[in-house]
Each structure stands twice: as structure tokens, then as C-alpha cells.
Image (cartoon, rainbow, N blue to C red):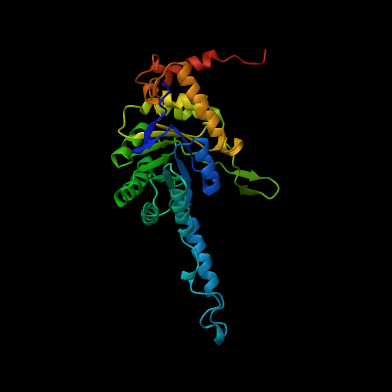
Amino acid sequence: MSVDLSTSYLGLKLANPVMASSSPLTGSIDTLKQLEEAGVSAVVLPSLFEEQIEHEAMEAHRLVEYGAESFAEALGGYFPELDSYNTGPQLYLDQVREAKEALSIPVIASLNGTTRGGWVRYAKRMEEAGADALELNVYLIPTDPYATSLDVERRYLDLLSAVVESVDIPVAIKLGPYFSSLAHVAREFVEAGAAGLVLFNRFYQPDIELEDLRVVPNIQLSTSSELRLPLRWLAILHGKLRADMAVTGGVHTSDDVLKSLLVGADAVMMASALLQEGPFHAAQVIAGLTAWLEEHEYDSVEQMKGSMSMASAPNPDGFIRSNYMRVLASYTSPVP
């Protein structure tokens, strides 16, 4: 009898818990087909960035208007009307439609907005394009020293509520780990209508270019060690919220997938490992997951899900402060 790898995420029935997270890989139809062939159960498309759309539209408008009244012959403009240009989200929406036509697995659209109206407007259009669900990629760096933690949380909740009220498809929110009371905020997100929580968003840190003295982007792909933080919070939150939970950031191997499921993840998202190893690395991860479950005589993923969460683990204090002393006491320096 084969092991049942199926799981459910955002109300979507998945053949297994391994998903392809939002990354450059999921921006290509050819690669999406490879990911499906490799066995991933769902894909999250790259984020649509509202500010990029607005910037492109402004640039096109500037080009159309430039010099339009310089000469009498140019009163009609040198270029076609702005409506003739594809400056909006149309390319992204076409990608959603093409992905839905090409794949038999769920396609989740991802949105990174800057204004309440932008979040709602583009969320509606993604739903109309056929997305099975929506992931809100909230990338908010609070820099105002007068803004309280409550102010920051309210911004998240306001945009989440607005999007949930505007669409009928399930909405997940991809959040960071830096809230002062993460468990409380997670509960508020669920009460505001989030069908799922994605733990955690990776806030890429800038670097300093010493020759030109410029702030420059510096993308570092994740490693398995980064999984420790979401593992802890998955374990703590499992069973306390009426929402699905997915983990992202640090999932590279079948062991990483197994640990995530054991502490309560409903789905496990991969990006960096697939970028490094290629789409078909997912097949190896799924094979490793299956082999471990068979070896340890599990009938299904559901049977083992959450069995090592804080509520079920034989030593739940390992997830909280009492483990701090043990970690420090157990460290052995490599230097004699």
C-alpha cells in the first residue's frame, strides 16, 4: 500500500505538500511545466509589484507627451495614444491565464502593493484572470520612529481586510517574523479573513558598495539553517488558529520538508533550492519524503502532520525559553 502524500492548503487539494514558491523560476511557462513534471503540487507566481506598474505607466506617459507641442505638426503627438501601450498589469494577468491553461495544478498569484486601492484593484484582476488563490507579499519596513507597533499591525490588517472583502478566492498573507507579538498578530490576520499564513517572508538586506559608496541589492539564497525560525513558530501556532500554514525559506531537502510537516505545516514551499539545483530537484525531495514515511510506517502525510508541534511534542519546552539555557550549555568550542 502506497503512502498518501495528499494535503490541503487554502482549500485546495494538493497531491503532496511540496510547492514551488514565488521566484524567477515560476515566471516562465516552460519552467512551470517542468516543475509540474517534477511533482510539485502547486505554484506561486512571482509577485506583481504595484510601484513597477505605476512607474512604467508614468514613463510611457512622459514619452508620449515629450515635445508634443514643439511643432504644429506634432500637436497630435509623436507616438500613439497611451492606451496603445501595455503599461499596466496585463503581462502578468496574461501569465496567470497561460499558467492556468498549461498546468493541471493550482496556480497562486502573488501581489505586492503600495496603496490600499492598488492592493484591491490588482487582486480583483488576478481573480478574474483565473488564479486559484492569492498570496499577499507584504514587504513593509517601518521607518517612522513615531509609528507604534499597533500602527504597523493596523496597516497590515487594513489591506488584508480590504483584499479579502474584494475577492472570492482564498487569500494567504506572507508575513515576516518581526512582530512584537507574533502569535497575537497571526490570530488577528486569521480573524480578518486570511485563509492561510506563509512563514516567513525573507527581507533581503542591502549592502554597501565601498568603491562608489552606494547602497546596492545583495541577494543571498537561503540555506537549511534558516528553517529553524519558521519551524519554531509553526510548532507554536499549530492547532491554535483556524487557518492553513505554509513554510517558506530554508526548505532544501526532504528532511526539511519532514521537519516542517512534523511541526504542523500544511504545505512546504521551495525557491532557493530549485534555483540552485533546477526544477527537477523537487522530484528528489518528494521521493525522499515518501521513502521516510514508508520506512517509519506512516500511512499518510496527515497522520504525521503536527505530531511534533508544541501541543504534541514529548518535550514542548524545547520550543520556548527553557531551551535557551540548554543550547548555551551544550555548545562546545572548536578552539581548545
Q: How far across and down, in percent of the image, does residue 263 sit?
A: 41, 24
Please tell me which residue lies in front, 184 or 260.
Answer: 260
Image position, residue 330 (x, y; %): 54, 13
| Relative to 35, residue 329 above or below | above
Question: Between residues 192 and 296, which one lies in front from this camera angle?
Answer: 296
Q: Report the front residue among 88 and 293.
A: 293
Q: Quadrant of residue 331?
A: top right
The C terminus: image quadrant: top right
Name the spot of residue 291 as percent of width and height, x first.
50, 21
Q: Is residue 245 left or right of residue 56?
A: left
Q: Residue at x 46, y 61 (%)?
A: 88
Q: Residue at x 43, y 49 (%)?
A: 100
- Decide if residue 236 is in sight here: yes
Label total for image = 0
Task: Report the residue that reaches farthest toward the right.
Answer: 211
Look at the picture and state if 289 lies above or below 47: above
For residue 252, say whether it is visible: no
Q: Position of residue 207 (x, y in %)?
A: 61, 43
Q: In the displayed image of the protein, which residue is found farthest to the bottom? A: 72
Can you say which quadrant of the picture contains the N terminus?
A: top left
**Image quadrant where residue 145 sits:** top left
Q: Nearer the viewer, residue 305 or 201?
A: 305
Looking at the picture, does residue 255 appear above or below residue 96? above
Q: Residue at 55%, 29% (x, y): give it.
A: 284
| Picture layout, residue 280 above or below residue 116 | above
Residue appearing at x 47%, y 29% in the figure: 229
